[in-house]
Amino acid sequence: MAALRAEVTTVADSDTPALGAVVVHTAHQSARVVEGVTATLTHECPDCRAVIGDEHDDGCDVARCMAYGTQRVQCSPGARMVVRGILPNGGVDVDWETDGHDCGRDVWSGRWPGLAECEEFDWWAVFVPYGNPSWRPVAAGTPGAVHDLNRLVVEAKWSPELRRWVR
């Protein structure tokens, strides 16, 4: 099977923050430069070691199902994980549904899946020990804020055509 390749370009525009020195373009996604966010690209997938532009290995925890946007390892032949909502403790409530879909093949972009969309939608959260919920939405720049991936899978919709989360 031929691997999908990525084009890596250097940004020389003086208006672009230093954090955006590299932009990755694949057939399906690009790493975005977002003001005030350190967008670090990782050459290899932290699980399967696929390099930027290559397909993830089967069984990789990072790879996404291209039909639904969830972890590919959470799908099984004929079934998929369905996110129902956020639990009172801030975790994600999931269930299983049978539909016989094909997960397709995901490509390592250099960034964890969903980070670019959280930045685009300005969705951030902080962990509150003993809080209810434990993860609370906050504004960008709040000390300790991280990408709100729980909110992403609950409030956004996965677009199989675009291979990304949309509002």
Image (tube, helix red, strand yellow):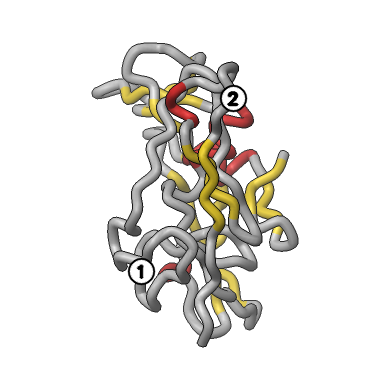
Q: Secondary structure at mark 1?
A: loop
Residue 145 shown left or right of residue 72 in the figure: left
Query: Which image quarter: residue 35?
Result: top right
Identity, as a three-letter code, of the amino acid under mark 2: Asp
Q: Which residue is mark 1?
A: 60
As drawn, which residue projects farthest toward the front? 12
Q: Is residue 113 above or below residue 122?
A: below
First in sequence, mark 2 or 1: give its number.
Answer: 2
Q: Which mark is residue 2?
A: none
Q: Name the side, left or right, on which 129 lies relative to 19.
A: left
What is the x, y in percent for residue 113? Answer: 48, 50
Mark count: 2
Vertical order, 125 against 116 (above or below): above
Q: Residue furthest bottom?
A: 1
Count neighbours of disc 1 (C-alpha within 10 A) and say few if under 14, some if 14 to 19, many if 20 or more. Answer: some
Q: Position of residue 92 (x, y in %)?
A: 45, 45
**Would you name the residue on which mark 2 appears?**
13
Residue at 45 percent across and 39 percent down: it is 87
Q: Is the residue 161 above or below the residue 24 in the image?
A: below
User: In the image, is 148 to the left or to the right of 78?
Assistant: left
Q: Nearer the viewer, mark 2 or mark 1?
A: 2
Q: Nearer the viewer, residue 69 or 137?
A: 69
Residue at (55%, 33%) from the top-left corner?
11
Which residue is found at the position 64% from the left and 58% from the top? 28
Looking at the picture, which amino acid does disc 1 mark? Answer: Cys
